[in-house]
Image (spheres, coloured by chain):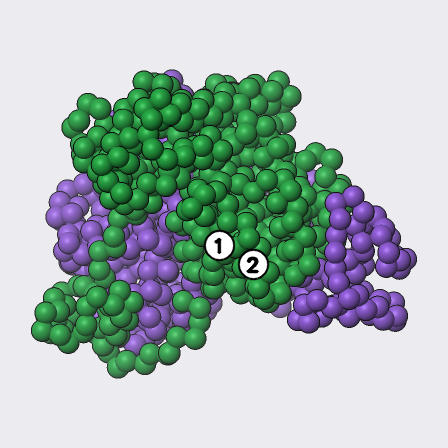
């Protein structure tokens, strides 16, 4: 890179250093530049095609700072750099087999082959997405025979997986419920705050995780939801809370629904693990269905990243349950108005895969089996980890939270220093909040992990 | 939308919703709150019945509405010239052979996974896309001054670019051509950028109002953003000549105006990928900065897969690195990371020289068919002695032709001849075939001779 001062007269363009350059664009026709302490005045910029006079100009983007790296990605990068043979990556937010391989479900491959054979076209989808997908996704979530479906009270719009669906809803809230807050759990998935911030929707937290019990701070949760201004949106994880793995019990869900109704709040579910948490699609949707059955209006974001392993295809949906079919029609039209200037219409591939699988009994059953297998593997490593902790730890500490928690993630209760010990001493990579991903834990490593956790918990402060 | 809205602090959620409703109505200006004729009364029960009561039905997208109307028409001679997608001579959508082949290879490759792409998308795709638009030998690429991020086709690339500029660029004004693609103003307005227009289409000549363009860009504030259609202007089909592009470039650089290219038709317009990238490349060649939104919807026929890329050409690699890091912060809260399938198809084709060749042949065939439809329509009108100068049909380029027909003439053509097109007189040449050109020519002839 050239660092000498180029002459003012014609010269070939060399990449310019920004240090020491100040340019004043506001004057328009003249540029005042300080370059290596010398001042140059250029009366006019003129360029010819073949000989470019030097533009002693600073990048218009010069003041842009380097954004901080994604905290979770940093974990994987550090893991890759580690050469220790016993290293374990428990930062990964995607399912891994016992052999620690990513998994493309057979049923997905079958669907893709079917689609290829049919030779379908690649025309634009409507703004709201693939109709067949929208139909099956709502039925999957609420149950095909549910009142909300029968009465056509759900506005369903295909979205870009969970994130994209949440963003559509956030934009709807900003536009039609200005000033309304979204209440999010403490802690919650890291990107929730970013989504609401970018959509300019105010948010505040409700207590959720209790480090003393490594469980749910139910009283705190209820109290905070009650204290929020009437008509707030309450963001709830439908199942397999991320990052804690701690879900309310069915009885607790009822009380949460009571409080929300009392305060005229609007429930806003993030359902990223339906079928992936317990292995049963219906069981994992029970919280959403409980609310819908009460006749409440609610928002539900869905993702097929984990339960169908379609991570990179970005397939999900935003569902808005309204008290009338007329309202649902209107809401859907406004969701479309939000999507159009964002990406015009959603990608077809993932939507067709889902529609083909759910629409075909054989494939649908195979999918259910696949989900049971994935959820089963995670449950079995939880069991093995728990057994190991119980057997090796003599302190009497209650490790049962490992079994009570559900889904891909678990909050271990380890603090930052203890988590660092996990990494530095034991080469176990996890996030600093004490979260581990069971999806990245092979059965063969459960004992090792138990040792690491016990050591970190007892010997580090 | 651009900040600066008065903060509301209504006491109840019902009040809040009603306030939102009032603001919504004030925007549409046709109904006055409180008037006896207002159908939106603040009844106590309506607020309780649904929290969404105040949300009105949005009107149908005008361009998509054309197809809706077309579908309803039972006439056997109906013609859909609203569609912005390529059709074969048989009137069918087309999936390129090379695309099918690439897709076959991808689906049959058992080593492929569906793990999340990085936030910026598929690395190969990004590199190859930058090369495609900027040229493989582009110094900007060689000097590592370009950041390219995979986005959701053209729209997504524009939106990410707009959001980025709104946050990190000091001039929040964009000049867009009059007319332009209907979605452009919305994309920028929602990102918090003020939209202004520069003169572009001259109805008198059915060509470029070059003087007006120069005047309007010349009076733009220094540093303003300027949207440029790289080729095949949508909806007019009117492009500047290379000489005119050079003048535009000089003017823009002299005023430090920031170019933001929308490249949706590279290769699809002239049939030649390099020619269609000429406008972008002369700007990049002068060492200055610019943004380029690319779409593979038309030139690879990947419409529904939503494949595109945003490239930002910066002065230095250091700036490019920082810009990329900030683009990620825009993308992550919008959709986290982009879809894999379409980008994989593109990357597969672009990196394989045989497939790339095959693609250029199929691409040229599409462009040629459209060019031949232009010629056929022009000849048909000339043969009918249709009054007026119709040479703009063969002078304009790309998928669309701005016929110059007015609203009345367009309605007439729809009612009497079952021709479906947008009311601005735009027709999609891609929707024409040799068989249907005579019918369209008859319709135009009738419209022009019977109505003014």
The picture quadrant where one finds residue B69 is: top left
Q: In the rendered image of this protein, does residue A368 appear above or below residue A26?
A: above
Judge from the rendering whether residue B365 lies leftward or rightward of residue A322; answer left or right.
right
The picture quadrant where one finds residue A434 is: bottom right
The chain containing the residue under callout 2 comes to B
> Which of these two is toward me, B68 or A380?
B68
Position of residue A183 measured from the top left corner of the image (x, y, whole percent): 36, 68
Position of residue B372 measured from the top left corner of the image (x, y, whole percent): 45, 22
Residue at x 15%, y 54% (from the top left corner): A326
Query: In the rendered image, what is the letter of the chain coloured purple?
Result: A
Dot placed on the residue nearer the N-terminal end, 2 or 1:
1
Query: In the rendered image, what is the letter of the chain coloured green?
Result: B
Position of residue B413 measured from the top left corner of the image (x, y, whole percent): 24, 35
The residue singled out by tag 1 in the image is B199
Residue at x 77%, y 70% (from the top left corner): A32
**Residue B408 shows up from this direction:** yes
Judge from the rendering whether residue A326 lies leftward or rightward of residue A79; answer left or right.
left
The residue singled out by tag 2 in the image is B215
Residue at x 33%, y 79% (from the top left corner): B8
């Amino acid at each position: 890179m050239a660092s000498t001062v180029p002459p003012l007269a014609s010269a070939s363009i060399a990449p310019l250093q920004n240090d020491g350059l100040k340019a004043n664009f506001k004057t328009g026709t003249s540029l005042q530049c300080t370059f290596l302490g010398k001042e140059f005045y250029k009366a006019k910029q003129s360029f010819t095609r073949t000989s470019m006079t030097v533009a002693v100009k600073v990048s218009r983007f010069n003041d842009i700072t380097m954004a901080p790296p994604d905290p979770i990605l940093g974990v994987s990068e550090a893991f890759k750099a580690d050469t220790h043979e016993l290293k374990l990556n428990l930062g990964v937010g995607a399912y891994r087999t016992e052999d620690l391989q990513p998994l493309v479900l057979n049923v997905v491959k079958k669907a893709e082959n079917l689609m290829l054979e049919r030779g379908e076209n690649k025309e634009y989808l409507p703004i709201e997405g693939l109709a067949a997908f929208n139909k099956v996704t709502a039925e999957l979530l609420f149950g095909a025979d549910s009142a909300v479906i029968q009465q056509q009270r759900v506005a369903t719009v295909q979205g870009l997986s969970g994130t994209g669906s949440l963003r559509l809803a956030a934009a709807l809230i900003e536009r039609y419920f200005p000033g309304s807050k979204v209440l999010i759990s403490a802690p919650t998935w890291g990107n929730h705050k970013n989504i609401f911030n970018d959509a300019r929707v105010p948010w505040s937290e409700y207590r959720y995780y209790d480090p003393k019990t490594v469980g749910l701070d139910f009283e705190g949760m209820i109290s905070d939801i009650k204290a929020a201004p009437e008509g707030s949106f309450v963001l709830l994880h439908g199942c397999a809370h991320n990052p804690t793995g701690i879900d309310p019990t069915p009885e607790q869900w009822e009380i949460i629904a009571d409080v929300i109704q009392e305060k005229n709040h609007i429930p806003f579910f993030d359902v990223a693990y339906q079928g992936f948490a317990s292995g049963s699609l219906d069981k994992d949707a029970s919280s959403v269905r409980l609310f819908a059955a009460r006749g409440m209006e609610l928002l539900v974001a869905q993702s097929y990243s984990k339960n169908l392993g379609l991570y990179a295809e970005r397939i999900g949906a935003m569902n808005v349950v309204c008290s009338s079919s007329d309202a649902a029609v209107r809401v859907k039209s406004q969701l479309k108005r939000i999507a159009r200037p964002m990406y015009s219409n959603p990608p077809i591939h993932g939507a067709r895969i889902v529609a083909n699988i759910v629409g075909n009994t054989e494939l649908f059953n195979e999918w259910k089996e696949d989900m049971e297998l994935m959820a089963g593997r995670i449950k079995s490593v939880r069991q093995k980890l728990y057994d190991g902790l119980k057997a090796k730890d003599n302190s009497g500490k209650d490790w049962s939270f490992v079994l009570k928690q559900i889904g891909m993630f678990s909050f271990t209760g380890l603090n930052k220093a203890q988590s660092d010990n996990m990494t530095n001493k034991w080469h176990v990579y996890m996030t600093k909040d004490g979260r581990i991903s069971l999806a990245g834990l092979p059965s063969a490593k459960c004992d090792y992990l138990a040792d690491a956790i016990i050591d970190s918990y007892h010997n580090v402060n | 939308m651009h900040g600066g809205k008065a903060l509301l602090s209504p006491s109840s959620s019902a009040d809040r919703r009603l306030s939102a409703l009032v603001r919504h109505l004030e925007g549409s200006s046709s109904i006055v709150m409180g008037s006896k004729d207002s159908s939106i009364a603040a009844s106590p029960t309506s607020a309780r019945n649904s929290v969404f009561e105040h949300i009105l039905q949005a009107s149908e997208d005008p361009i998509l509405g054309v197809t809706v109307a077309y579908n309803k028409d039972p006439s056997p001679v109906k013609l859909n010239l609203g569609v912005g997608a390529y059709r074969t001579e048989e009137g069918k959508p087309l999936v390129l052979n090379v695309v099918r082949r690439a897709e076959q290879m991808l689906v049959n490759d058992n080593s492929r996974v569906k793990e999340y792409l990085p936030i910026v998308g598929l690395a190969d795709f990004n590199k190859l896309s930058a090369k495609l638009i900027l040229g493989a030998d582009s110094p900007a690429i060689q000097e590592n001054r370009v950041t390219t991020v995979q986005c959701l086709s053209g729209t997504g690339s524009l939106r990410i670019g707009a959001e980025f500029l709104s946050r990190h660029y000091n001039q929040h004004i964009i000049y867009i051509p009059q007319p332009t693609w209907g979605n452009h103003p919305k994309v920028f307005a929602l990102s918090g950028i003020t939209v202004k227009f520069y003169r572009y289409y001259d109805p008198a000549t059915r060509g470029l109002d070059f003087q007006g363009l120069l005047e309007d860009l010349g009076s733009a504030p220094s540093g303003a953003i300027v949207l440029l259609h790289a080729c095949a202007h949508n909806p007019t089909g009117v492009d500047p000549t290379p000489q005119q592009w050079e003048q535009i470039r000089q003017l823009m650089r002299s005023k430090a105006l920031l170019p933001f290219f929308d490249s949706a038709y590279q290769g699809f317009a002239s049939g030649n990928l390099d020619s269609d990238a000429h406008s972008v490349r002369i700007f990049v060649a002068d060492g200055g900065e610019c943004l380029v939104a690319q779409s593979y919807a038309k030139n690879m026929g990947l419409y529904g897969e939503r494949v595109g890329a945003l490239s930002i050409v910066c002065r230095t690699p250091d700036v490019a690195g920082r810009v990329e890091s900030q683009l990620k912060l825009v993308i992550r809260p919008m959709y986290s990371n982009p879809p894999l399938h379409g980008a994989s198809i593109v990357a597969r084709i672009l990196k394989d020289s045989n497939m790339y060749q095959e693609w250029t042949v199929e691409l040229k065939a599409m462009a040629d068919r459209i060019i031949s439809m232009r010629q056929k329509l022009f000849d048909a009108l000339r043969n009918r002695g249709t009054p007026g100068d119709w040479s703009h049909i063969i002078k304009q380029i790309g998928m669309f032709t701005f016929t110059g027909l007015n609203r009345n003439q367009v309605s007439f053509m729809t009612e009497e001849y079952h021709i479906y097109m947008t009311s601005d007189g735009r027709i999609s040449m891609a929707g024409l075939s040799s068989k249907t050109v005579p019918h369209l020519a008859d319709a135009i002839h009738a419209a022009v001779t019977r109505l003014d």
